[in-house]
Image (cartoon, helix red, strand yellow):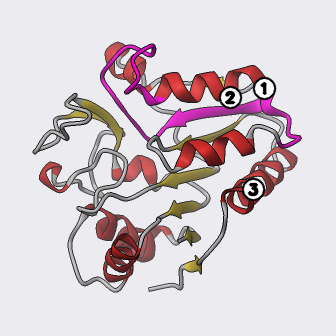
Amino acid sequence: MDRVDMRPGADDAAIADWIAIRIARALETTDGTVPIALPGGSTPFPICEILVTRDLDWSRVVIEPTDDRVVSEDHPASNAGKLRALFEPVGARLASLVEMEASGQLPSGGYRLVWLGMGTDGHIASLFPNTDPRVDDERWLRRITPDPLPPEAPFDRVTLTLPALLSTDELLFVIRGEDKSALFEAALRGENDLPVARLLAARDIGHHRPVTCFT
């Protein structure tokens, strides 16, 4: 497997700067919009709060969640609601996966950057082990029910599928904690068949997208 760029010990500001550099490069190399996919959860939002202070042409950036809970945007569990509150004031556009799923609209695809976290069970986006995610999934957006339902967020989810997550120039992981880091490295070595391992294996076999992982 191609080497993943592992970067231990980076703080939130360093990660925000890394992302800002990628967005700036994408803005320089295209005249159109720059779609990026961002995760929810407690780890990303402090980084995003720093990211929005960076001097970029945010009016050309389209933000899509990698996944979301099927709730209204004013609900505390909504990723889209939190991302909209952060990014729209600086001029970026937010595309809601919940609205896409309801209307039959497709995700953007062709992302310049997909940023993922990972759960202790190896799930990415809302592709939990029980959903049996497939690289050859014919759909780019699915509604799923986690099993078991997390007690802190007992809602159905909408999620980008593996093909959608792989339709990117570059993959970013931010994984905090020794247990998660060990699980990620085991997936990277092909020692399990968890969703994160399937993504990494597919990226290596046919997609060859650069992967950076901050731990």
Quick check: marks 2 and 1 in contact, CB under 8 Å?
yes
Quick check: marks 3 and 1 in contact, CB under 8 Å?
no
Q: Residue at x 44, y 56 (%)?
A: 117
**Residue 52, percent from left and from top:** 75, 37
> Is 32 left, or right, of 158 in this rendering?
right
Which residue in the protein does label 2 denote? Answer: 87
Q: Few, some or many C-alpha atoms within 10 Å of disc 1 (few <14, some 14-19, many ≥20)?
A: some
Q: Earlier in the sequence, mark 2 or mark 3?
A: 3
Disc 2/disc 3 C-alpha distance (Å): 17 Å
Which residue in the protein does label 1 denote? Answer: 90
Considering only vertical position in the picture, is 212 above or below 185? above
The stretch of residues the image draws in magenta is 54-79
Q: Amino acid at mark 2?
A: Phe
**Residue 89, percent from left and from top:** 74, 20
**Residue 30, percent from left and from top:** 81, 43
Q: Nearer the viewer, mark 3 or mark 1?
A: 1
Q: Nearer the viewer, residue 149 or 101?
A: 149
Q: Secondary structure at mark 3?
A: helix
Q: Secondary structure at mark 2?
A: helix
Q: Amino acid at mark 3?
A: Arg
**Residue 146, percent from left and from top:** 17, 41
> Is 179 left, or right, of 30 in this rendering?
left
Which residue in the protein does label 3 denote? Answer: 22
